[in-house]
Image (tube, rainbow, N blue to C red):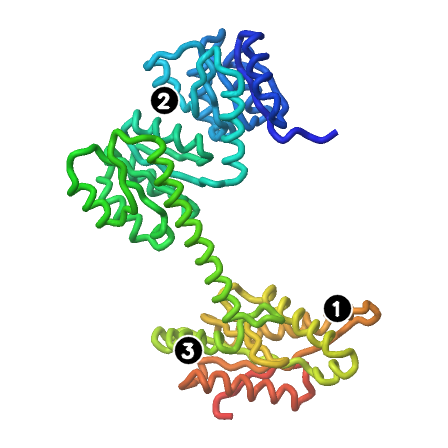
Amino acid sequence: MEKEKYKILVVDDSNSCRKAIINDLSPLDAKFFESTDGRHALISALKIKPDLITMDVEMPKMNGFEACKKLRGNKTTCDIPIIMVTALASKSELEKGFEAGVAEYFVKPFAKGDLYNYVKRLFSGREAEKSGKAFIGSNDKNSSNIIRMALEKNGFDISEYENAMQLLGSLEDETDLLLLDESIKGLNPYELTNLIRRQKEFEHIPIVYITEKGDPLKLVKALDMGANDYLQKPFWDRELIARANALVKSKRLFDVVQAQNKILETLAITDKLTGLYNRHFLEEVIDKEFGISVRHKRPLSLAFLDVDHFKKMNDTHGHQNGDLVLEHLGQLLQKSFRVCDIKARYGGEEFVVLMPETSLEKAAAKMEKFRQALEKYSLPSLDGRTQLQFTVSIGVAGTEQAIQTKEDLLRFADESMYKSKENGRNRVTVHQSGQ
């Protein structure tokens, strides 16, 4: 039997009210769970982890407000949307609910289809992720409640902070929207906006500045500091959503373009076959690392590797198996050396490993260990009929040998590699000063 898409917990001490809610939501592909009081609802929510909770206010053992606060205070249940379905509809009761973390209020008796339509929009918004992750920085409870309720209706995942430093410490680069009220504690919103904009990972998060009406200079200053838009209280929730969606849409478009640029940058510096860096990028890095080595008198070593008898490998097993050997050699180099070591395909069957902060002695030992492991390594050919075995000849040079230029570093390692070839292949040769 196919599993239902959603789990909904219905909490009410009235059997008829629970049935009415379940009946209204029955068109949803959902499994319903029932609780008759707030305390039982807490246990059920932790156990079943529902996608939605509907909650009455007046119930035995624990009322809806208290249950809602406890659900919001638990890491497992803090993100579950809670809808209050109650006969209590005074302004003070509504404020209590929103303060406790309620997403929406429905007053009993509600018209058939109203609850269903709201929940359907809520689930659709979350699935499509049409909105995103929003941070609210505010010490104005009423303003925060209005913003949270409006954004949650439209599928936003909300995080709220009263203190500027707590908000700053929790901010993530995946944040899609930041709504910053001038009432926030700890820092004034201009300083906070400036701090956020100075951090590269946050520089493109849309910021909406929220203020009381009356002083246009505040808005100008907020925009100067890096805010993208503003809202003046009291504002219409539709205005908030329209502005929020427009900003998030622009941010998402920027994220897509940025991701595409990163892919293009990676392709520009990567060898397609092996996944290692290419020669062009290697030469840029050698230039940088050689400069650091000279300035700070730190060791820098470089190894040149060449696959032995590679032409014979291609002639015997075909170029596709030859490519397979190069691809696997690239993978082995990635696994065998540090993240900070630069592994590159220099061209054809030639590879380079650049090792910052590594003495010539240690570099030679690392390469000998790699050579010995490779000597015992084999991989199946593409047709699976043959085990392909191969070795490499290696040359190593380092800045400890009074090498004057990066070109010399490459040349001496290359020459040492050819000495390995001349002396029988499958060996490591270290460049000697004065050669």
Mark 2 — residue? 99
380 above or below 425?
above
Q: Which tag, 3 or 1, sits closer to the chain's start?
A: 3
Q: Residues within 10 Å of mark 3 (few under 14, many from 20)?
A: few
**What distance separates the C-alpha of mark 2 from that of mark 1?**
63 Å
Q: Which of the two discs, 2 and 3, sits closer to the camera?
A: 2
The secondary element bearing badge 3 is classed as: helix
Q: Which of the two discs, 2 and 1, sits closer to the camera?
A: 2
Whether residue 427 is visible here, answered yes or no, is yes
Residue displayed at 59% across by 74% down: 367
Q: Residue furthest bottom?
A: 435
Mark 2 near mark 1, Cβ–Cβ under 8 Å?
Answer: no
- Residue 239 at x, y percent in the picture: 33, 35
Mark 1 — residue? 379
Q: Nearest the camera: 368 or 168? A: 168
Identify which amino acid the numbered label 2 is placed on. Answer: Glu
Tag of residue 170: none
- Residue 107 at x, y percent in the picture: 44, 14
Mark 3 — residue? 287
- Residue 154 at x, y percent in the picture: 44, 34
In screen coordinates, is 354 left or right of 34?
Answer: left
Q: Residues within 10 Å of mark 2 (few under 14, many from 20)?
A: some
